């Protein structure tokens, strides 16, 4: 499914918001997963759910992104690997 190695981290809502904010400041384009996405059944509705909310109002369930290691380390500062 993925063409890259995947690392999974864990965080609370506050940590996810911080990761999203740091991603934005470093021009990292994340895929955003909100709680509302789990109520939709297709990509078009998923995108609509996210597009109707401001970043500050997203009920984040997760994020995904690809970046070089140095940038990823800065974006993920403060979150830990999922165990």
Image (cartoon, grey):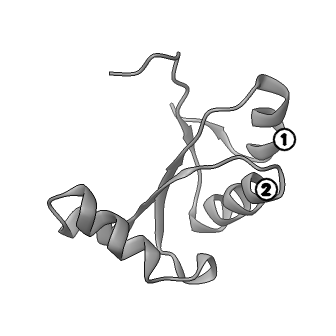
> Which residue is more in the foreground, 14 or 67?
67
Q: What percent of the width, then of the height, locates residue 70?
A: 85, 28
Q: Is residue 12 left or right of residue 61?
A: right
Q: What percent of the width, then of the height, locates residue 54?
A: 57, 82
When the figure is inspected, residue 71 is found, relative to residue 5, above or below; the finding is below
* Residue at figure coordinates x 61%, y 76% from the top left: 55
Report the Cα–Cα distance between label 1 and label 2: 8 Å
- According to the picture, the residue beneath numbered tag 1 turns out to be 74
Q: Secondary structure at mark 1?
A: helix
Q: Secondary structure at mark 2?
A: helix
Determine which quarter of the picture holds residue 74: top right
Please tell me which of labels 1 and 2 falls first in the chain.
Answer: 2
Q: Spot the residue most to the left.
A: 41
* Residue at figure coordinates x 55%, y 26% from the top left: 7
How many marks on residues?
A: 2
Q: What percent of the width, then of the height, locates residue 66?
A: 62, 33
- According to the picture, the residue beneath numbered tag 2 turns out to be 22
Q: Is residue 47 left or right of residue 60?
A: left
* Residue at figure coordinates x 45%, y 16% from the top left: 3
* Circles 1 and 2 in contact, beta carbons < 8 Å: yes
Number of other residues with Cα within 10 Å of mark 2, as a class: few under 14, some 14 to 19, many 20 or more: some
> Which residue is more in the foreground, 81 or 19?
19
């Amino acid at each position: 499914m993925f063409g890259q190695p995947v690392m999974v981290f864990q965080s609370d809502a506050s940590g996810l918001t911080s990761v999203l904010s740091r991603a934005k400041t470093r021009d990292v384009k994340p895929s955003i997963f909100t709680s509302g996405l789990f109520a939709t059944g297709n990509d078009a509705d998923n995108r609509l759910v996210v597009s109707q909310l401001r970043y500050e109002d997203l009920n984040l369930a997760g994020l995904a992104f690809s970046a070089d290691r140095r940038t990823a380390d800065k974006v993920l500062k403060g979150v830990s690997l999922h165990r």
